[in-house]
Amino acid sequence: MTLAVRVIPCLDVDAGRVVKGVHFENLRDAGDPVELAAEYCRQGADELTFLDVTASSSHRNTMIDVVSRTAEQVFIPLTVGGGVRTPEDVDSLLRCGADKVGVNTAAINDPTLISRVADRFGNQVLVLSVDARRERGEQHTASGFEVTTMGGRTSTGIDAIWWVKRAEELGAGEILLNSMDADGTQQGFDLEMIRAVRREVSIPIIASGGAGKASDFPPAIAAGADAVLAASVFHYGKLTIRQVKDELRRAGHTVR
């Protein structure tokens, strides 16, 4: 049976407000996360992703109160990430309403976090968030894509394709693949990166970074993504969830 493609709005939150920029810089206000979450639920979003975009770089935990208030307003799966460092952090987020939890920087620093979370809560809870970009300067990876941290500000030199394969082996249930080169540009998803990851993993891939118009979404699915995620095109009213789903249907994809 063909699984339905998921359309997922992303709430990038900083200091209790939804923000959006380009390449995670020059962030501007996009609204209240609770209000936006409720609106996307009404529009027919399949899931919501809540990312505390400065939790890791500020060395603090995700804002539990905002997550709790957001969870109260939505009746669709909610993934929360940002500042998650331990299984206890995951437990706290699940208790306040998250259905899945995203890990990024802490998993790179200690890959055993992936297996410890998966073993305790199940693979379906763990989403590995991968902020990847085409390598620059001195970095040389086999795939040409490297992993970054701290919202793309810190280069790791880790091959992104190797990392997603390793994460799947350790127990990650899903990959949130964000192209840092495309993020916020509204020039379309990085299809080459999606294809490269799809060749190596069997777990679901959420494509993120670069959505600018409805016609950008079907190629991401054709490249191998199981779900598509976007932020600014939804926050600023450029597109609705329905418009994206209609475009996916026209391209022959099954949607809810």
Image: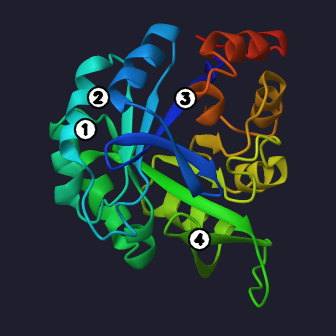
Q: How many marks?
A: 4
Instruction: Determine whether, in the image, residue 73 is placed left or right of residue 138.
Output: left
Between the C-alphas of marks 1 and 4, the distance is 26 Å
Residue 181 rendering spot, x and y as whole percentages: 74, 59
The residue nearer to you, when weighing 109 against 240, is: 240
- First reached walking from the N terminus: tag 3 or tag 1: 3
Between the C-alphas of marks 2 and 3, the distance is 15 Å
Q: Are marks 2 and 4 in contact (CB under 8 Å)?
A: no
- First reached walking from the N terminus: tag 1 or tag 4: 1
Q: Amino acid at mark 4?
A: Thr
Between the C-alphas of marks 2 and 1, the distance is 6 Å
Q: Amino acid at mark 3?
A: Ile
Q: Secondary structure at mark 2?
A: helix
Q: Are marks 2 and 3 in contact (CB under 8 Å)?
A: no
Neighbourhood count class around disc 2 (C-alpha, 10 Å): few under 14, some 14–19, many 20 upward? many
Which residue position is annotated with label 3? Answer: 8
Residue 189 rendering spot, x and y as whole percentages: 77, 43
Which residue in the rendered view is the most extreme toward the bottom? 138
Between the C-alphas of marks 3 and 1, the distance is 19 Å
The residue nearer to you, when weighing 9 against 54, is: 54
On the question of residue 219 being in view, the answer is yes
Which mark, by number, is residue 66?
1
In percent of the image, x 33 and y 50: which residue is there? 15
Q: Which mark is nearer the camera, 1 or 4? A: 1
- First reached walking from the N terminus: tag 4 or tag 3: 3
Which mark, by number, is residue 70?
2
Q: Secondary structure at mark 4?
A: strand
Q: Amino acid at mark 2?
A: Thr
Which residue position is annotated with label 4? Answer: 148
Q: Are marks 2 and 1 in contact (CB under 8 Å)?
A: yes
